[in-house]
Image: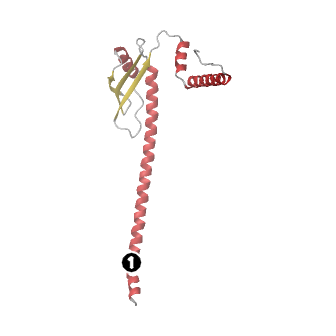
């Protein structure tokens, strides 16, 4: 047997072991990939469940929120703990909006009673920070409120731009005809 043939014969078991090692490595990589995918899918399920839980909680609190009727604007931030079974504990104000607003915020949470149980996979307790924003319009008529809302709207800005363009066109035509159409002259 020649040296090359002898070397080839000796390398066959080494190549077989390498091929087997690669096969096991690829199998292990696939298994890890599947585990990671499953974990991500599970995390997505937990996140979806948690989002649904939080949306329901938010709606219940907002339904109970009766903002103060004095003053113009305010913000109250409350912090409370929800246990795994849905019971609420340790409510407190972390940013005050005044005594009346603070009391209304705590009452809104308290009036909800217990919430649904936390989603499966959630920790034993979850701290929730809830922000209450309010604006009191007082004795302003509804049409005045609508006018104020309209002033800041995109549609209102678009109407103003159209008016400005028309005014510029009139001014341009006036210059072309030799007459000044600029406001104030």
In this view, 73 is above or below 38: above
Say which of 150 and 159 sits in front: 159
User: Crowdedness of circle 1 by 10 Å Cα count: few (<14), some, many (20+)?
Assistant: few
In this view, 140 is above or below 111: above
**In which quadrant of the rendered view does residue 109 lie?**
top left
Q: Is residue 182 visible to the viewer in this orientation of the structure?
A: yes
In this view, 114 is above or below 30: above
Q: Position of residue 98 (x, y in %)?
A: 34, 16
For disc 1, the marked residue is 13
Say which of 104 and 73 sits in front: 73
Specify the farthest residue to the right. 177
Which coloring applies here?
secondary structure
Residue at image location 40% in from the left, 34% down from the top? 118
Q: Position of residue 90 (x, y in %)?
A: 31, 26
Residue at image location 46% in from the left, 21% down from the top? 63
Q: Quadrant of the C terminus?
A: top right
Say which of 157 and 42 sits in front: 157
Q: Is residue 147 left or right of residue 1?
A: right
Residue at image location 37% in from the left, 21% down from the top? 76
Q: Is residue 160 left or right of residue 10?
A: right
Q: Position of residue 155 (x, y in %)?
A: 58, 24
Specify the farthest residue to the bottom. 1
Q: Is residue 112 visible to the viewer in this orientation of the structure?
A: no
Question: Element type at marker 1?
Answer: helix
Q: How many numbered marks are there?
A: 1
């Amino acid at each position: 047997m020649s040296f090359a043939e002898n070397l080839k014969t000796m390398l066959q078991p080494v190549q077989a072991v390498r091929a087997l090692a690669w096969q096991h490595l690829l199998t292990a990589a696939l298994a890890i990939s599947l585990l990671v995918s499953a974990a991500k899918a599970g995390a997505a399920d937990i996140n979806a469940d948690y989002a649904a839980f939080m949306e329901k909680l938010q709606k219940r609190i907002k339904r109970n929120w009766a903002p103060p009727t004095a003053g113009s604007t305010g913000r109250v931030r409350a912090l409370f703990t929800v246990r795994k079974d849905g019971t609420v504990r340790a409510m407190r104000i972390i940013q005050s909006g005044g005594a009346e607003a603070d009391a209304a915020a705590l009452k809104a949470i308290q009036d909800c009673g217990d919430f649904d149980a936390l989603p499966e996979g959630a920790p034993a307790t979850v701290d929730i920070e809830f922000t209450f924003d309010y604006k009191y319009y007082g004795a302003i008529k509804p049409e005045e409120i609508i006018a104020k809302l309209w002033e800041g709207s995109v549609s209102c800005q678009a109407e103003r731009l159209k008016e400005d363009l028309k005014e510029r066109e009139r001014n341009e035509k006036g210059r072309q005809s030799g007459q000044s159409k600029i406001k104030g002259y």
